[in-house]
Image (cartoon, rainbow, N blue to C red):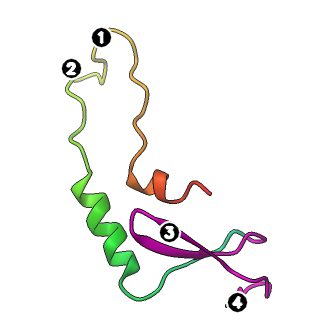
């Protein structure tokens, strides 16, 4: 399959059971029917509640490193 933007051959990558077609040249991403729904469902199931802290947004102690989410793992190519 060719990229609709620049005509480069698309590369297929499988991430978490979802096939993603992307262009290595322009970095465009294309999904087939139902794949966006799978990504949304998995993203929602991995959502975590916000950390508890006081009203100023300071929880005391060391700042925590932001945990990568499902979408970050999915689109890291």
Dot 3 or dot 4: first in sequence order is: 4
- Label 1: which secondary element: loop
Q: Which residue is mark 3?
A: 14
Residue at horizontal 43%, vertical 42%? 68
Q: Quadrant of residue 43?
A: bottom left
For mark 1, does the 10 Å Cα neighbourhood hold few (<14), some (14 to 19), or many (20 or more) residues?
Answer: few
Question: Would you say the residues marked 4 and 2 are in contact, meaning their CB atoms lie under 8 Å apart?
Answer: no
Residue at horizontal 47%, vertical 52%? 73
Kindly report the distance in space between the C-alpha atoms of the residues bearing marks 1 and 3. Answer: 40 Å
Dot 2 or dot 1: first in sequence order is: 2
Q: Which residue is mark 4?
A: 4
40 sits to left or right of 48: right
Question: Would you say the residues marked 3 and 4 are in contact, meaning their CB atoms lie under 8 Å apart?
Answer: no
**Which one is in front in this view, the residue at disc 4 or the one at disc 2?**
4
Kindly report the distance in space between the C-alpha atoms of the residues bearing marks 1 and 4. Answer: 50 Å
Dot 4 or dot 2: first in sequence order is: 4
**Which one is in front in this view, the residue at disc 1 or the one at disc 3?**
3
Kindly report the distance in space between the C-alpha atoms of the residues bearing marks 2 and 3. Answer: 41 Å
Judge by depth and name the residue closer to the eye, 66 or 12.
12
Judge by depth and name the residue closer to the eye, 2 or 5.
2
Judge by depth and name the residue closer to the eye, 26 or 21.
21
- Label 2: which secondary element: loop
Question: Does the magenta run of residues contain 37?
Answer: no
| Residue 54: mark in rendering | 2
Question: Would you say the residues marked 2 and 1 are in contact, meaning their CB atoms lie under 8 Å apart?
Answer: yes
Dot 2 or dot 3: first in sequence order is: 3
- Label 4: which secondary element: loop
Kindly report the distance in space between the C-alpha atoms of the residues bearing marks 4 and 2. Answer: 49 Å
Q: Which residue is mark 1?
A: 60
């Amino acid at each position: 399959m060719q990229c609709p933007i620049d005509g480069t051959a698309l590369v297929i990558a499988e991430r978490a059971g979802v096939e993603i077609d992307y262009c290595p040249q322009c970095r465009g991403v294309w999904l087939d029917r139902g794949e966006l729904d799978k990504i949304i469902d998995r993203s929602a199931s991995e959502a975590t509640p916000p950390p508890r802290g006081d009203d100023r947004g300071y929880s005391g102690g060391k700042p925590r490193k932001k945990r990568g989410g499902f979408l970050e793992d999915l689109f890291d190519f």
